[in-house]
Image: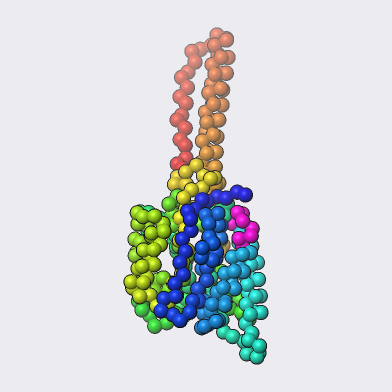
Amino acid sequence: MEHSFLIAQPQGFSLVGQRGNQEDALFPPLGEATPAQRVFMVCDGMGGHEHGEVASRCVAETVGTLTAAVGGCAVEAMRHTFEAALNEAYRRLDALDADGDGRGRTMGTTLTFLAFCTDGVLVAHIGDSRVYQFRRGQGVVFRTRDHSLVEDLIAAGELTPEEARSHPRRNIITRAVQPHQESPARATFKVLTDVRRGDLFFLCSDGVMEQVENATLAQILLADAPLEQRMQALVEECRHRETRDNHTGYLLEVVGCPQLSDVETVPAVAASADGGCPVSSLRRCVCRSSGFRYVWLLVVLLLLALLLVMVGRRCSTPQEAPRKVLLEPVHRPSR
């Protein structure tokens, strides 16, 4: 089976914080992830004891299992699979959201999803759990935009990121996976093709961001230390700052790609699957660069052959002295 990306051993954690129960869920479950895993999820449940944890576990297991079953595939195929899996998760939540007396139960969950595909990384999210992409020397190069009230206020220019951290309504989200909705929430997608060796992807519930800012996250996760030690350092930071909410995450490091000669030479290309930009492929970028090399080489050889034929003809019959021919230098496109 063809895979575009090689990753190190995934590092995950899931801590209760100062809550009475754990409403976050991971896919794969802690201890089950391997470098061969293509799909990762973090879900943060809501609805109180036995409600949020049921919803987050149901969605993580359903979407994670169904998408992981397709293995290494292209972004477009993975997106279709994800949407079908999300529909199945809604169906299962509807079935779960009844306690036998007809009143039902209030439950729901956020969702973050990341899949390593053969032509890019597919990210999907609903709610305020996040996916980050970190790069040495640059820090945060991508993060999902929360479906939350304060994020909407920031986008409208009515609130600064600093003010949002202490805003009294910062816990209000505008999108979640819940049962029995007339218009079930759909995911926002992002396709990432500017992915380089050494990049980190971090999926986390909002409990991690409760006390730890982006700059601190980048400093800890991009430190010169083994991946497991960096994850433990983040866990200790959350504990030191007395993070109250459940805090859960998966830390993933890209260590190579069997389809790319050198991931770090790939031009930066990012496309949104929400519309507009076509989905570009890392493999296509590199193959295109290699293709240009061979095309230019072929052109040069053909010009040389043509020149030799012309010179040969003129040498075989008396003619005026041949004019000098300047072969223009060939400029290769930058890679």
Seen at 48% across and 58% down, the residue is: 10
Q: How is the image coloured?
A: rainbow
**Which residue of the protein is positioned furthest toward the top in this rendering?**
318
The answer to which quarter of the image holds residue 63 is bottom right
Magenta region, mostly helix, strand or loop?
A: loop
Q: Is residue 78 magenta?
A: no
Report whether 37 appears left or right of 208: right
In this rendering, the answer to whether 2 lies above or below 188 is above
Residue 118: x, y in percent? Answer: 57, 52
Residue 136: x, y in percent? Answer: 37, 54
Residue 327: x, y in percent? Answer: 47, 26
> Which residue range is magenta in the image?
67-76
The answer to which quarter of the image holds residue 278 is bottom right
Seen at 64% across and 58% down, the residue is: 70
Foreground: 191 or 245? Answer: 245
In this rendering, the answer to whether 334 lies above or below 7 is above
Q: Can residue 295 be seen at all in this image of the molecule?
A: yes
Seen at 47% across and 53% down, the residue is: 8
Residue 237: x, y in percent? Answer: 35, 68
Seen at 47% across and 73% down, the residue is: 128
